[in-house]
Amino acid sequence: MSPHAINRRSFLKLGSLGVALGAGTTHRSHAEDPTAGDIQPGGPVRRTLGRTGLKVTAVSIGAMRTSEPDVLKAVFDRGVNFVHTGRNYMEGQNEGIVGKALKGYRDKVYVATKVSASSKEEMLGKIDESLKALEVDYVDIVTRGSASSAEDVMNPVLREAMAEARAAGKARFLGVPTHKNEAEVLNALADDKDKFFDVVLVAYNFKKDKAVKEAIARAAKAGIGVIAMKTQAGGYETKELGDISPHQAALKWVLQDPNVTTAIPAMVNLAQIKEDLEVMGMPLSEVDKQILSRYGDAIAPYYCAACSGCDGTCPQGVDIPSVNRCLMYAEGYRDLDLARAAYADLPVQESAAHCGDCLECVAQCSRQLDIAARMSQARALLA
């Protein structure tokens, strides 16, 4: 049956079948699942984070949108042992929330934080601020701001600052996130003779190009620990799936890649905790694939996969994928504050502010997004 021909009643039946299949196939042989050996008896799945050697849960938590320490504690109580936060998240408040949640858990949970800076002094100063907010002496991983090119990966100023922080015992390992041109960044990490970065946080989901999957495999082979973010492809609510949630299927799709160590979806309540954590040890079924196909079709008119196919097509130099990512925070995550904060962080010359200077939009999307309409929406909603 074509997934495009499935009606709502059929999908509800498939959803019930998927639950039954998932419940009956949690434990698998190595032949069925290359990561089956990582399943801990009586506990969650753990995988090795590249050359760091850290054994982290296959589903961990990105705390960027978590506002209650008790939510984080509930996640830790369920065996999750890795959390990622950031100096600028929630206007500087998120690390403090994570710090409160870590009381009594620090010896059980690995902590990573992202610090965005443009100079050595700023980077070192912000790392100190992060440690103070988290109320810890060190973090297990410190990551710099997002990289979008091979040249950016090699930024000597940020490398010098991060190396100094590691030498001072403020961070055990170093990482870099990437939301755009992910394949180029991942390949640069794999080719780096200095092996400077130990970890990469990469936007990765079922909508990404094959090139990203292949670059993840190269990075993992080079010893880079791969952390998947943006795994839910926006987490949009859609009427096309009826009562069926695509979010477990989306997480399973990411975790079936043996080169991914952990996924860090946001969790803001107990329902999300339950939904996300129970996929550990579950296979990606044919039902899941059909659900993702329908979800992918539903979000196609507005979801940007940041494939960079539009690069160079805007004469004003607008960073179209980054603007679309901000819109995703508003429309998919339903977090307007986060969307506006992320949009405000974009350089003015790369925002949608300059779109009004053109009589007609000539930027082109390889996936047929209406770029002019999306940029207009950004100006109206985020500026």
Image (tube, helix red, strand yellow):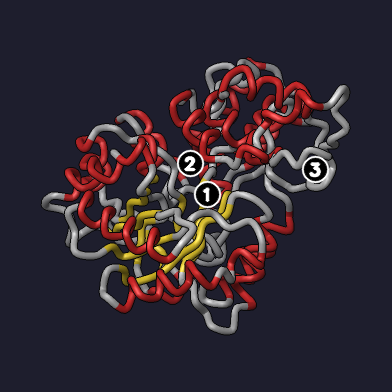
The amino acid sitting under disc 2 is: Gly
Q: Secondary structure at mark 2?
A: helix
| Residue 181, numbered circle | none
Q: Residue at x 51, y 48 (%)?
A: 229
- Front-lying residue, 114 or 11: 114
> Horizontal and vertical percent for residue 10?
65, 20
- Secondary structure at numbered mark 1: loop
- Residue at the location (31% across, 68% down)? 171
Dot 3: element: loop
Judging by the rendered image, the residue that carries numbered circle 2 is: 22
Residue under pointer 1 = 283
Q: To which residue does mark 3 refer?
A: 310
Q: Position of residue 35 (x, y in %)?
A: 48, 63
User: Mark 2 or mark 3, which has the lower sequence index?
Assistant: 2
Cα–Cα gap, marks 2 and 3: 39 Å
Q: How far apart, in angstroms, are the residues tagged by discs 1 and 3?
A: 35 Å
Q: Is residue 315 left or right of residue 223?
A: right
Q: Is residue 29 visible?
A: no
Of labels 2 and 1, earlier in sequence is 2
Q: Amino acid at mark 3?
A: Cys
Q: CA distance from mark 2 to mark 1?
A: 7 Å
